Amino acid sequence: MTAETVPSGAPAAPGTTSLPTVLLRPGEADRILAGHPWIYHGSVLRLTHPAADGELVQVKDHRQRLLGVGFYNSKSKIHVRMLGPERIPVDQAFFETRIKAALDVRRRHLPGASSFRVVNAESDFLSGLIVDKYEDVLVVQTSALAMDQRKAQIVAALQKQFSPRCFLERNDTAFRKFEGLADSNGILAGAMEGPIHIRLNGLQFEVDLAGGHKTGLYLDQQSNYQQVAAFAPGAQVLDCFSFLGGFGLHAARAGAAHVHMLDQSADASAAAGRNAAANGLTERCSTETVNVFDWLKAKTAVKPHERVIPQFDVIVLDPPSFTRSRATVPDALRGYKEIHLRALKLLRAGGTLATFCCSHHVDATTFQAVIMDAAYDARRVLRRVATYSQSLDHPILPAIPETEYLKGFAFEVVR
């Protein structure tokens, strides 16, 4: 069977009968068959015909057995991003079907949410595409060349499903450079001026979609905001790396005695203050623009033979990723240990530490081990009372470990 023919009894989809074929080296097919969508440069044996970067190709094992189709890019370490196990045309109808399937998952698991991630790349079998919904605005990220080339089809498919007032492109991630793509930001369709206001779990947030973190907000913590708030009634709460006040405002609404929010960004701190006011929570909240490491260090600095006086009943640690590569993991672990050591010294006995790590390169077991090292040095004994993961609009496929990146724990200080 040649690359241009189709097995008997398996009619080809339109436009897929003459696809270039990528043949894999022996032993490289198992991971793809198990559902992982990335084919690296070193896994490719050869191409039967030249393929243009961004072109749809079919993938076969070294015995010429079809594994599926995907997008090719010779400039990327990920030579092929698989789309599915069958020959399928990739057109607007394809994107409409995949996006609808992704939306059905969100409606099933987050039925009341009006702002959420619609498409989560590999988790939704659309490697290199992220779409976030903020009320009636959609933010699109294309981190793969082929998806970037098909933005018009993607936007048309999204328009048909959502009819938003604005499509915003936020393509300033480092991943684009690996695909040979330059940054690209701005409005793709519609109109939007300044920050918008969204609702998460019944709270109002002002979000700068053009300049905020990620695509504007940490939607992956949407469920965790409410779960952590369960520890807050009557508590003195410290929200470290607070950004727009996600954890802090949920804690204040839940009945915290007071919430102090720390962030190094003056803009984020100001927005958190406005969000507190918009939700009638100003009296229970305060903000401070500060380097969190320096703040924790200063609050736990004592003279010889003195001890730190714990001030808080709940402390939330939700820092940005400390590492984006395996090479810097040791440095990241030292950073994680430092902030946990300081935070544990500020927690009262019986208090709760809610802590998160968003780096894929630091797994949950390693993260917990670092926390236990910090607890030992702080002479605190902890009881784990909750385990957290990313919100269900960021689905985890175990066959694709990269889809699971956010992990968190809540620990009660026994003594």
Image (cartoon, rainbow, N blue to C red):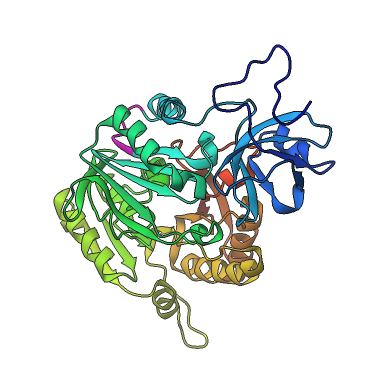
User: Quadrant of the rendered structure where residue 162 is?
Assistant: top left
Please determine whether, in this image, residue 141 is positioned above or below residue 180. above
Residue 279, given in percent of the width and then of the height, sits at 17, 48
Instruction: Give the farthest residue toward the top.
Output: 9
User: Quadrant of the rendered structure where residue 173 is?
Assistant: bottom left
Residue at 42% in and 28% down: 109
- Residue 15 is left or right of residue 233, and the answer is right
- Residue 320 is left or right of residue 398, and the answer is left
Please determine whether, in this image, residue 69 is positioned above or below residue 175. above
Residue 397, given in percent of the width and then of the height, sits at 59, 36
Residue 40, given in percent of the width and then of the height, sits at 69, 50
Residue at 26% in and 70% down: 266
User: Quadrant of the rendered structure where residue 284 is?
Assistant: bottom left
Please determine whether, in this image, residue 96 is positioned above or below residue 300. above
Residue 99 appearing in the image: no
- Residue 151 is left or right of residue 397, and the answer is left
Between 330 and 83, the one lying in front of the other is 83
What segment is highlighted magenta in the picture?
111-115
Which secondary structure type mostly characterizes the magenta part of the structure? loop
Residue 131, given in percent of the width and then of the height, sits at 39, 42
